[in-house]
Image (cartoon, grey):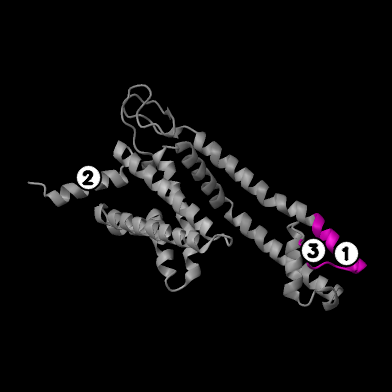
């Protein structure tokens, strides 16, 4: 069957845009990251109030240049993708779309153009380009730890919310509007600021009972901050140990079972092992 020129061009662009193992693909990705970082820098400078109107006009033109460039790139990805709908619904597909919309939205809402800073998320493609598998594996361990500790963290958050509500209500009764505690929500805001050891100082107790309650809350704050840290540390250690364990799979050729988790072939006979997700 004869390959049409359009199909040949589509496949060629697909290799350049989506294939990170070829020289052209790596060059395209590096140029894309440079353009993304440049557009973010332009957006940051455009937010400076001391620039001249001419400088702001130049930065706006540059922003439109990058927006049109990213729009063309997004349409090219849709055109040459094997499954365009699947790409559009993927994480990078959604980020790519969001990276182009803010400048168009600014035609109706001028301040909306600064939402274009979401483009910095597109730099995450550097993990694929540079083959930083160690960092990708580390992110997987972190996500696994977050998933394993979600119930404990949920209980911890509800406990903190309950403590904030109780202490905020007590402080409202003890101090009252004269000291700035004008309502229970305002008192809960003070409790959160105090519990997290931020301490803005915009509201402060003046009575002895209020200061005693604040002192107890401050001491509790140091202990409470350590709780999620300990939970996450334990789960990360468990996930790390699980990732370092050998694969529990036996080679059909020689019977050897102690293979690395990323092994595709048997250490002894070289026979292909079943994929990890098939275990």
51, 44: nearer the viewer: 51
* Residue 113 visible to an observer of this rendering: yes
Q: Say whether marks 3 and 1 touch (CB < 8 Å).
A: no
Position of the C terminus, as image quadrant, is top left
Residue position for label 1 = 211
Q: How many marks?
A: 3
Residue 239 falls in which quadrant of the image?
Answer: top right
Q: Secondary structure at mark 3?
A: loop
Residue position for label 3 = 201
The residue under the point 21% across, 47% down is: 11
**Mark 2 / mark 1, whichever is N-terminal:** 2
Residue bounds of the magenta highlight: 200-219
Q: What distance separates the C-alpha of mark 3 from that of mark 1? A: 13 Å
In the image, residue 142 lies at what x, y percent?
Answer: 54, 46
Residue 153, relative to residue 145: is it above or below?
A: below
Residue position for label 2 = 12
């Amino acid at each position: 069957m004869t390959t049409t020129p359009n199909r040949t061009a589509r496949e060629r662009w697909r290799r350049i845009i989506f294939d990170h193992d070829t020289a052209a693909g790596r060059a395209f990705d590096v140029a894309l990251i440079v353009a993304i970082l440049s557009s973010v820098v332009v957006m940051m400078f455009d937010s400076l109030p001391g620039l001249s109107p001419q400088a702001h006009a130049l930065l706006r033109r540059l922003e439109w240049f990058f927006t049109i460039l990213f729009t063309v790139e997004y349409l090219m990805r849709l055109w040459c993708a094997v499954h365009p709908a699947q790409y559009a619904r993927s994480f990078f597909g959604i980020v790519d779309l969001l990276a182009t919309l803010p400048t168009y939205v600014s035609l109706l809402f001028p301040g909306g153009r600064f939402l274009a800073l979401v483009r910095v998320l597109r730099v995450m493609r550097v993990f694929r380009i540079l083959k930083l598998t160690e960092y990708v594996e580390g992110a997987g361990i972190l996500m696994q730890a977050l998933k394993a500790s979600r119930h404990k963290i949920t209980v911890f958050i509800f406990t903190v919310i309950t403590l904030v509500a109780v202490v905020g209500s007590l402080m409202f009764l003890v101090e009252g509007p004269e000291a700035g505690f004008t309502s229970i929500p305002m008192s809960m805001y003070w409790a959160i600021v105090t519990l997290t050891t931020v301490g803005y100082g915009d509201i402060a107790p003046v009575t002895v009972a209020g200061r005693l309650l604040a002192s107890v809350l401050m001491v509790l704050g140091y202990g409470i901050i350590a709780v999620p840290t300990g939970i996450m540390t334990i789960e990360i250690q468990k996930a790390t140990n699980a990732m370092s364990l050998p694969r529990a799979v036996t080679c059909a050729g020689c019977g050897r079972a102690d293979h690395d988790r990323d092994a595709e072939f048997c250490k002894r006979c070289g026979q292909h092992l079943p994929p990890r997700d098939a275990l």
